Amino acid sequence: MDKTGVKIAVIGGGTGSFTLLSQLKHYTKHLTALVNMADDGGSTGMLRDELGVLPPGDVRQCLVALSESERVRDLFNYRFEEGTFSGHAFGNLFLTALEKMTGNFASAVETASEVLNITGEVHPVTLDKVTLVMKQADGTVTEGEFKIGQSDFGASKHPEMALKPSTAQLNPDAEQAIMKADVVVIAPGNLYGSLAPALIVPGMSKALNATMAKKVYVCNLVTKPGQTDGFSVADFAAEIERFGNFKLDYVLYNDDKPSKELLDTYAKEGEFGVEPDKEALDKAHYKAVGGHFVSGKPYAAAQDADPIAQTRTLIRHDADAIAKELMRICFA
């Protein structure tokens, strides 16, 4: 199989998927982004509330990542700073207008894909309007991805996650991409606020267990205060498997420490580097692959106009190093 013919499906949303997709597109033309659809914060949340549309924000970022048109990428990421549209990214408004015009979000994404001249495809993980629901061990129930992402779980770790309504289903196009893939990648991202809602979509577990693809998780670089404090690489991987009810084949983790200055900056916010528990990883059923996966380069210029995408990106993945490792896994 020619390297450019490798089929890779990336599950996630937000900047984690953006960063990875931006580099993977240079290695294969058969790349599919499968995007979390529970986002309800910022511009996306306002559009959902006011117009009843599906959340465009994470889809926009994935489309921009795969775009080959620099000027249009910048346009889609342009965020209005004043007036009626203050806080909205143009791409969010574009996708919303297309959905209202056609009555079909999948068609809206397809049209935007053509306008942006993307490499590969972008599919929502579900086309149902869903709300993320979290239930903690003490019985506390929290609804909404944004609220959950900002929550402090306290002593109540490993919460139950679900989507409302429970009748939501995996998008058939997402299922097909998973079944045809050579590799399925779980991108780094907010564990409970971004990855969980993508993995718990009814039908996702069945697809992940049925596919012949190698299943790879790219572990986060830092912990999130109040949610993943003290989590090791194995702890993150265990939660990914719990959400999707499947078994990983590979876990990629960083074994190259960022500078002390950067670590100290994050530590002030209660965020710490994710440590590999070598004993746990040696016993794991998956193959744990450590590497120099921290980037020393400035953040992707395509995101400069998007203040949301720039937050908390001092310590970030070296997406090209990860892409090269994923290609090695394809042919392992």
Image: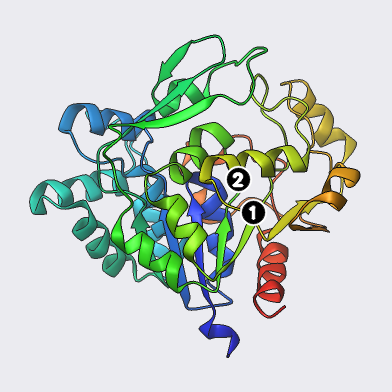
The residue at 55%/9% (across/down) is: 138
The outermost residue toward the bottom is 1
Tell me the quadrant of the picture where the C terminus can be found.
bottom right
- In x, y percent, where is residue 247? 62, 54
Residue 198 location (% of width, % of height): 44, 45
Q: Is residue 294 visible?
A: no
Count of labels shown? 2
Circle 2 — which element?
helix
Residue under the image location 21 percent in, 45 percent down? 96
Q: Is residue 145 visible?
A: yes
Which residue is labeled 2 in the image?
241
| Dot 1: element | strand
Label 1 packing within 10 angstroms: few (<14), some (14-19), many (20+): many
Which residue is drawn at the image coordinates 10% and 50% (left, top)? Answer: 103
The quarter of the rendered structure image containing the N terminus is: bottom right
Quadrant of the rendered structure where residue 66 is? bottom left
The residue depicted at 37 percent of the width and 60 percent of the height is 174
Per the rendering, the mark at residue 79 is none
Q: Please state which amino acid type lies under the numbered disc 2.
A: Glu
Q: Please identify the quarter of the rendering in which residue 50 is found.
A: top left
Query: Would residue 223 be found to the left or right of residue 206 on screen?
Result: right
**Rendered position, 233 above or below 148:** below
Q: Kindly check if marks 1 and 2 are in contact, taking CB atoms under 8 A apart as contact.
A: no
How far across and down, in percent of the image, does residue 228 sit?
68, 28
| Label located before the other in sequence (1 or 2) | 1
Q: Nearer the viewer, mark 1 or mark 2?
A: 2
CA separation in Å, label 1 and label 2: 10 Å
Residue type, label 1:
Tyr
Q: Which residue is mark 1?
A: 217
